[in-house]
């Protein structure tokens, strides 16, 4: 594809999606009234298994999946609306997030029928949490340099290696682990596979990584002679690179790539009165215009996925632009708060708490889902520049 051929279709939401949006907003209002969803003081995805179960009971997890596995067979754009509303409301969706966004779709596309029936219905109800086992120490975003290995043994595989930045692995029941199962011949992308690992198995050690915000979301996971059965293999042995590439498109394109800092902007708008400085209004207008543009791009990827198209490059564009937007948003909001003196003498306490947390959390925007350098390489390759 050349630069001239690059075009991104801007979809329109169907009427049923807007109806669904109203349903989600009613659910959020009910949760707030019941005291189960207080106004946020942090950004990022919270973890609340009971909230995930209530969302699952509404049919909003795995909603595009076949009904045979508990899904609703709804469109990707309808799922997008639900995701957008839950994130904008700061609903703690971390318990089902990874499983709904990528682990389940990977099993749908590449897994066996037995795997689908074993895992998907429990994901849909909000009872099953998956973690991602891709990144490794000293590898950064270069997944092909992974050192974790799985040796074929009678009846299954023996896994040895480490995974890092494994969000919510200490809460999860399962992890899809990317491992080398054979030596690469020619391309180093060969000989890589994906295995489903029960994190309660002997030989699995989960160690916390505490962030600058003094939070335990990330972990390092050590696998020492962990034995899994033959039925743990997802797809074909050695096809893991193609499978994980499709998975990363799902991870990189969603509204979480620009909605993490939305709570900060929303709180700021609520704190500003009608007499805001003209410079403040200009900065807010610029940020909101960027947000709307990112939303259209992100929705276009959802539309491509709905049509069964590959969206690796387009998802990388969304993630790269979203990263820059979110980090710039934190800087702009900090400057506005200072210029407008919004937190002086204890005013707007929640806004101050959100800003402090956002500043501590912002470095993660660049890392999660692949660094900008890796993403730009994917984009360059996609448009024929390399």
Image: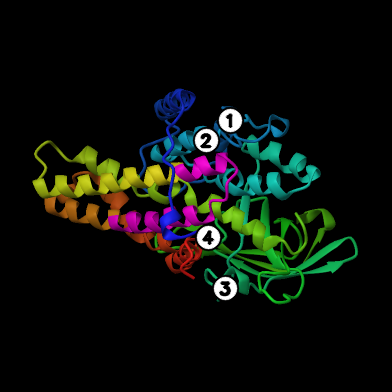
The residue labelled by disc 3 is: 137
- Expressed as whole percent of the image width and height from the top left, the position of residue 62 reads 61, 37
The residue labelled by disc 4 is: 218
Q: What residue range appears in magenta?
A: 300-328
Query: How far is mark 3 from mark 1, CA to CA?
Result: 39 Å
First-in-chain label (4 vs 3): 3
Q: Secondary structure at mark 1?
A: loop
Foreground pick, 163 / 348:
163
Mark 3, Cα crowd under 10 Å, few <14 / some 14-19 / many 20+, is few
Q: Are marks 1 and 2 in contact (CB under 8 Å)?
A: yes
Mark 2, Cα crowd under 10 Å, few <14 / some 14-19 / many 20+, is some
The residue labelled by disc 2 is: 79
Q: Quadrant of residue 332?
A: bottom left
Secondary structure mainly formed by the magenta segment: helix
Judge whether residue 169 can be spotted in this image. Answer: no
First-in-chain label (3 vs 2): 2
């Amino acid at each position: 594809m050349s630069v001239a051929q690059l075009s991104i279709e801007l979809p329109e939401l169907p009427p049923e999606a807007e109806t669904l949006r109203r349903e989600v907003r009613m659910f959020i209002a009910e949760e707030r009234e019941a005291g189960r969803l207080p106004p946020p003081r942090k950004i990022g995805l919270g973890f609340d298994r009971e909230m995930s179960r209530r969302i699952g009971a509404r049919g909003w997890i795995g909603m595009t999946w076949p009904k045979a596995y508990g899904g609703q067979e709804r469109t990707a754009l309808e799922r997008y609306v639900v995701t957008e509303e839950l994130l904008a409301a700061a609903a703690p969706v971390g318990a089902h997030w990874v499983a709904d966004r990528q682990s389940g779709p990977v099993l749908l596309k590449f897994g066996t029928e037995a795997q689908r029936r074993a895992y998907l219905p429990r994901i849909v109800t909000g009872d099953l949490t998956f973690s991602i086992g891709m990144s490794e120490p000293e590898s950064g975003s270069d997944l092909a340099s992974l050192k974790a290995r799985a040796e074929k043994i009678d009846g299954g595989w023996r896994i040895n290696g480490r995974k890092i930045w494994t969000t919510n692995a200490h809460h999860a029941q399962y992890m899809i682990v990317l491992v080398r199962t054979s030596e690469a011949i020619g391309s180093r992308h060969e000989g890589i596979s994906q295995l489903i690992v029960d994190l309660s198995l002997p030989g699995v050690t989960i160690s916390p990584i505490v962030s600058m915000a003094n939070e335990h979301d990330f972990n390092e996971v050590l696998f020492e002679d962990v034995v899994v059965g033959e039925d743990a293999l997802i797809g074909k042995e050695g096809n893991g690179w193609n499978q994980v590439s499709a998975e990363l498109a799902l991870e990189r394109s969603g509204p979480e790539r620009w909605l993490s800092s939305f709570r900060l902007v929303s709180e700021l708008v609520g704190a500003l009165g009608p007499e805001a400085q003209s410079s403040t209004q200009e900065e807010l207008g610029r940020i909101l215009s960027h947000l709307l543009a990112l939303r259209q791009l992100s929705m276009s990827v959802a539309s491509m996925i709905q049509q069964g198209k590959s969206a690796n490059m387009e998802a990388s564009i969304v993630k790269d632009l979203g990263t820059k937007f979110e980090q710039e948003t934190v800087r702009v909001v900090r400057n506005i708060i200072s210029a407008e003196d919004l937190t002086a003498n204890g005013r707007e306490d929640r806004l101050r708490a959100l800003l402090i947390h956002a500043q501590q959390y912002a470095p993660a925007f660049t890392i999660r889902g692949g660094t900008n350098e890796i993403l730009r390489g994917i984009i360059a390759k996609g448009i024929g520049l390399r």
